[in-house]
Amino acid sequence: MKKTFEKVYQLKLSMKGITPQIWRRIQVPENYTFLKLHDAVQAVMDWDDYHLHEFKMINPKTGEPETIGTEGEDFEAFGEPLVPEKKAKISDYFTLENKDALYTYDFGDNWQVKVRLEKILPKKEGTEYPICTAGKRAAVPEDIGGIWGYEEMLEILKDPEHEEYEDTVLWLGEDFDPEYFDPKDVSF
């Protein structure tokens, strides 16, 4: 049986540390867990879920910061109790007063995405959720080496004479354009 929902959370996902900014706007059902939200972030950023991830967010009931992630990933070893993402509902954390979470993906590259609740909307009949409604720029490629590696890749792409240009284009694919993004291309 499908779980029903009446409201939709409109979230803006903004990559931290990259200018001009890479961002996405998505709408997800209010009954989403953080695991489902993780899956949606992976889809709109065109990542392959190869790496560990976590959410950090204030629990509005306690006022304390919490780490929300996958059970079995031993964050407790770092002194941080872990809230299981497959049980934690976004509606228990995101409120109009408690709008922001930090999503970190790939602790080596350390991609940080600010997740901000923009609006809580009524569900539109006939719309299949989640959906991506807007965004700017292509997402950072998986395993590029963090912000430094991403910036180096952009410099290489500007110079067809660069010694690593051909290898970089081969690795990225000839159709990679760092400025291109179309929300219609997102497949959840």
Image: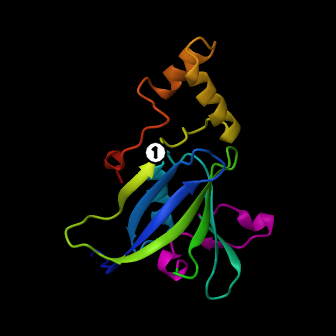
Q: Which residue is nearer to you in this view: 19 or 126?
A: 19
Q: Residues within 10 Å of mark 1 (few under 14, many from 20)?
A: some
Q: Residue at x 62, y 26 (%)?
A: 155
Q: Which residue is mark 1?
A: 46
Q: Is residue 148 above or below residue 25?
A: above
Q: Residue at x 67, y 87 (%)?
A: 62
Q: Residue at x 43, y 72 (%)?
A: 32
Q: Identify residue type, mark 1.
A: Asp
Q: Which residue is nearer to you in this view: 138 or 4?
A: 138
Q: Residue at x 43, y 38 (%)?
A: 180
Residue 140 painted magenta: no
Is 122 placed left or right of 46 in the picture?
Answer: left
Q: Which residue is nearer to you in this view: 122 or 38?
A: 122
Residue at the extreme left of the image, as rendered: 126
- Residue 67: x, y in percent? 66, 70
Is 66 placed left or right of 128 in the picture?
Answer: right
- Residue 123: x, y in percent? 29, 75
Is 125 placed left or right of 35 in the picture?
Answer: left
Q: Secondary structure at mark 1?
A: loop
- Residue 187: x, y in percent? 34, 49
Bounds of the magenta span? 70-94
Residue 86 painted magenta: yes
Q: Quadrant of residue 81?
A: bottom right
Q: Which image quarter holds the C terminus?
A: bottom left
Q: Is residue 33 visible?
A: no
Dominant SS of magenta comes to loop
Display colour scheme: rainbow
Q: Is residue 47 visible?
A: yes
Q: Which image quarter holds the N terminus?
A: bottom left
